[in-house]
Image (spheres, rainbow, N blue to C red):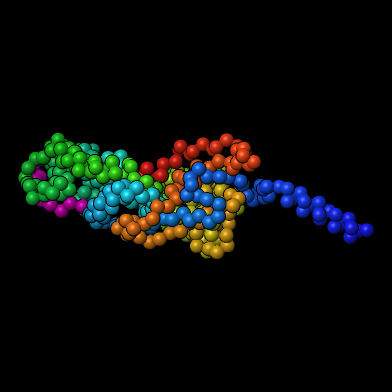
Amino acid sequence: MRKVIKTAILIAVFLMAAGCNHVVLRQDLYERVAFESEKIKPGKNIIQLYSLEFPKNYFDRLEYMKDFELVAKQLLLDDKSLNLLVSRGMYDTVESLKKEEVLPEEKVYLKTASDLDNAEMSEIDKGIDVYVTDRGGSIQGYLNKQVYFWMVLTGKESEFIGENLYTELDKQRLVEEVRKSRKEFSRVLKNIKMHMVIREEAPYSHKDIESVPSETVNIFNPTDISKWVLDEKEALYLKGIKNSDFDKISAKKVKFNSPFLILDSKKFTGYTVLDGNYIFFYGGTSVRGYYHRYDLEVKISESTARDLLNAENGILLDELFERKKPEINGLEEEKTQPKKNSVNWGIN
């Protein structure tokens, strides 16, 4: 009799399961979702990132960006969709070019000479080794050095005369000439389909004294990761995370402002989602997932700027945020989730 009852129960469970179109998994482990982009389909999806090495020397960076400009123009013509993994220096450089601003290393040469502080004067002295007159005093000397810097950028260094008393207007004219020469590149960067992830290899370093975590901050940050890393609003790739902190992050006990975070991991691959933001794991073998039926995985390829010309169109980072609840029996379960308008990926 007991066998009969047990068999009947099993048959009933089987019939109920057979009549269901969808098997609902545990909601604390998986969420049902669909993506607006046709490139993201149920099954395995690779999020391809191309890692670029940016020179450390300023003039080497200028030469690099000349090459990158040619590549970017071709990518725009080919309508390529790419994600880049870049250093903080390259991210800041591209952002400045997009906004038609001078590059970070150039700001000290743009500043009014009379407003320079001792550290800025020292920086100019290290960067510019050219004779300048002392007839106008030290401020005139630094203004002349600033003018020489912009003459170098415009290819007019041979016209520089150290005995001249150059003016701020002379400097401004040269600066505008440099800005004008970069306008076309700026338009290209604003229009290509390319997003950047910033590579951070020192997540525990403190940029300034205000960034040092206090006892109050530690209540909300159970890790030793610097506050400026937690507050960063751009996409990040973090290396060198301590095992204890990694466990807290993977357990969703740490809040990042970054909408797209990649953690270097020897254990995990795949991803999870916290408050609508992605945390990807790169380098391990144990697979993690969040959205039902969607296996998302990051792949990183070391590349040169010219390698990008042969790259294939891929899934852009912002397409991961174009999500909606899937349709069940022809009806959408919930309204489409709004896009994250606050995200600034660096290159639009």
62, above or below 101, in the image = below
Q: Residue at x 60, y 38 (%)?
A: 332
305, above or below 147, in the image = below
Residue 230 picture location, percent across and down: 49, 47
Q: Residue at x 24, y 42 (%)?
A: 184
**Where's the C terminus, which quadrant?**
top left
Check if residue 173 falls in the magenta segment.
no
Q: Is residue 290 left or right of residue 308?
A: right
345, above or below 7, in the image = above
Residue 57 picture location, percent across and down: 26, 56
Q: Which residues are magenta?
A: 127-135
Q: Nearer the viewer, residue 283 or 87?
A: 283
Which secondary structure type mostly characterizes the magenta part of the structure?
A: loop
Q: Is residue 24 left or right of residue 63?
A: right
Check if residue 129 falls in the magenta segment.
yes
Q: Residue at x 93, y 58 (%)?
A: 1
Residue 181 picture location, percent across and down: 20, 43
Q: Nearer the viewer, residue 287 or 44?
A: 44
Q: Is residue 39 left or right of residue 294?
A: left
Across the whole image, how many numbered discs are drawn on residues? 0
